[in-house]
Amino acid sequence: MSERTKLVVAVDPTIFANYRELLRAQASSRVRTFLLAAALLALVVIGFWHLDISLWRVITGFSELGRLVVLMFPPTPGSWANALLYLHSLAETVAIAFLGTLLAAVLAFPLGLLAARNVVPARIVQFMTRRSLDTVRGVDTLIWALIWINVVGLGPFAGVLAIMTSDIGTFGKLFSEAIEASDKKPVEGITAAGGNRLQQIHFGILPQVLPVILSQILYFFESNTRSATIIGIVGAGGIGMHLVEQIRTFEWDRVAFLILLILAAVAIIDWLSSSLRHAIIGKSAAAA
């Protein structure tokens, strides 16, 4: 026993008893942390073994990647006609992302209202709406693209429907959460003034949540530009169709050109959407 512990016991034995219990609790916490870390490490090792991941495959993969990077330089479209075709497909990809995001937001907004606890008092309506949104959100955009391709055929229309369907579930959840997080005081003030339910939503809730909703829509438009590229690979229109075609024919210099086009488009959209989001948030804060 250390001198400090002896001093504590001499002053008050109950302090030492509490101190000992604290040490035991800390030791138990350390053991649980160690066991959790050991379990996670075991899961990682088992996962690497089961998926046949080895250091040698990683090393050889990086060497092959280096060879492909060398083949990608200099990036070239091949001809001016190809360059114009790729630019047109890039514009088509952006249009798919924009229309899909816009349609999803329009359709998801009333669903978000139905799923919000402070808007619809009927619990069964909230439950059914939320579970429906979960079901739609549980299917990836690429799967929706494959489904819609079989329904409406190849082309950008299937891409728009795929992004719209996938985003309805996500937007509905985000919109309902934003509505539920709104301040109750404006609604209570409108109620005290004799306002009905629609007036409470229109004047009490919407002014609070619209800036948040617009910010979310802009962010998803940026994200869906990348998604529209991926679903184009399976035939849903856009520049993804040309990208997979050039990969299959080993035209790596054209692949590099297409990748640079996609990166430039995403960067521009990211900058524009970020500027608009900051402007919306700034106006909302100034109004508050």
Image: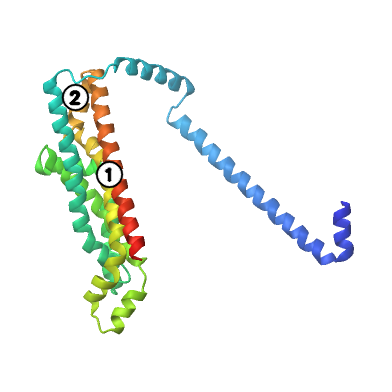
Which residue in the protein does label 2 denote?
245
Is any part of residue 287 visible from this angle? Answer: yes
Q: Earlier in the sequence, mark 2 or mark 1?
A: 2
- The amino acid type, in three-letter code, at marker 2 is Glu
Is any part of residue 173 visible from this angle? Answer: no
**Residue at the location (22% across, 21% down)?**
254
In the image: residue 88, left or right of residue 135: left
- Where residue 102 sits: x, y (%)? 19, 51
Of residue 287 and residue 252, the one placed in the foreground of this image is: 287
Above or below, 256 against 3 in this view is above
Q: Residues within 10 Å of mark 2 (few under 14, many from 20)?
A: few
Above or below, 262 against 163 in this view is above
Which residue in the protein does label 1 denote?
272
**Residue at the location (27% across, 16% down)?**
74
- Where residue 149 sits: x, y (%)? 14, 40
In the image: residue 204, left or right of residue 150: right
Q: Element at badge 2?
A: helix
**Residue at the location (14% across, 42% down)?**
158
**Residue at the location (16% across, 28% down)?**
86
Q: Element at badge 1?
A: helix
- Color style of the picture: rainbow
